[in-house]
Image (tube, rainbow, N blue to C red):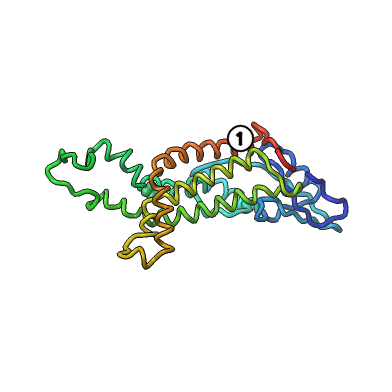
Amino acid sequence: MDEPGAGSGTWVWTADVLQEVGLPARFGGQGWEAERLDRLGRFVCRRDREHPLRWAYRRETTGGPGRERLAARLATEGWELFGTWWGISPAIIILIFPLGFRLTCYYYRKAYYRSMWLAPAACAVPEPHATYTGETRFPLVLQNVHRYFFYVALLVSLINTYDAVVAFRHPTDGFVVGVGNLVLLVNVALLWCYTVSCHSCRHVMGGRLTHFSKHPVRYRLWTWVSALNTRHMLFAWVTLGTLVLTDLYVALVAAGTITDLRLVG
Ligand code: FES
């Protein structure tokens, strides 16, 4: 990390703040006030060159309802830099979408409730129940929201792709490749395989067509998605593992428990 120039008035820096707990206090003491985070997550700081003020920074960690109380207590001191609109961790809030996508996935439905309720057990296997309503009644009818979760999952995959690409740009060293970049890349590639092999995606590509010959592009896309779709169960399980391992790897690097091995740059 570069030190700020002696006479400069603005400065952008980044560090593993979880590990380097003393840095904000040290730079605050030099007159640097953290104004905001830029889109790479770096601190954008300003300093009055003529009349520098000293800023004291304190780290507070909390979660759940405690966050509200802490934010209210610190608000008068101007500590809450990034807003307080959420009551729980944003990491939990964002889980609604990938979790909703997976819980309503056609494959996972088979794995987590059809295999236990045996409704239906399989094609050509007699139903143990007198009547079969499938997923046409509450609560199972809610599974139909899967197609909407699919659209959100596309958005999430795009954001993950963006993250994997910008991770190649180090704030000070330029283009770099580390083990972490490869982890993110493999993770996002497999996520795309899982998302695009979705049954809803297959329907979006080739559903409701009576003449494939009149829609050659959609037919071609439908063929590709259908080929991937045969491996949907595999992608469902593999991505469950890679998601956890990728998050774990990123968390361990961010906490300074392990160091990301630099391969290029
Ligand atoms: S069917 Fe599994 S994700 Fe859509």
Q: Is residue 68 above or below residue 206?
A: above
Q: Nearer the viewer, residue 107 or 97?
A: 107
Q: At 71% across and 45% down in the image, what residue appears?
A: 176
Q: Nearer the viewer, residue 47 or 104?
A: 104
- Judged left or right of residue 257, residue 129 is left
Q: Amino acid at mark 1?
A: Leu
Q: Position of residue 193 (x, y in %)?
A: 47, 47
Q: Position of residue 124 (x, y in %)?
A: 19, 42
Q: Which residue is mark 1?
A: 252
Can you name the residue that lies furthest to the front here?
A: 213
Q: Nearer the viewer, residue 15 or 242?
A: 242
Can you name the residue that lies furthest to the left here?
A: 130
Q: Is residue 157 visible?
A: yes
**Dot 1: element:** helix
- Crowdedness near tag 1: few (<14), some (14–19) or many (≥20) residues, C-alpha within 10 Å: some
Q: At 67% across and 48% down in the image, what residue appears?
A: 168
Image quarter for residue 19?
top right
Q: At 37% across and 45% down in the image, what residue appears?
A: 103
Query: CB at mark 1 closer than 8 A to ligand 1?
Result: no
Q: Position of residue 216 (x, y in %)?
A: 41, 64
Quadrant containing the C terminus is: top right
Can you name the residue that lies furthest to the bottom here?
A: 214
Q: Position of residue 11 (x, y in %)?
A: 78, 53
Q: Is residue 100 visible?
A: no
- Judged left or right of residue 248, residue 49 is right
Quadrant containing the N terminus is: top right
- Judged left or right of residue 10, residue 37 is left
Image quarter for residue 121?
top left
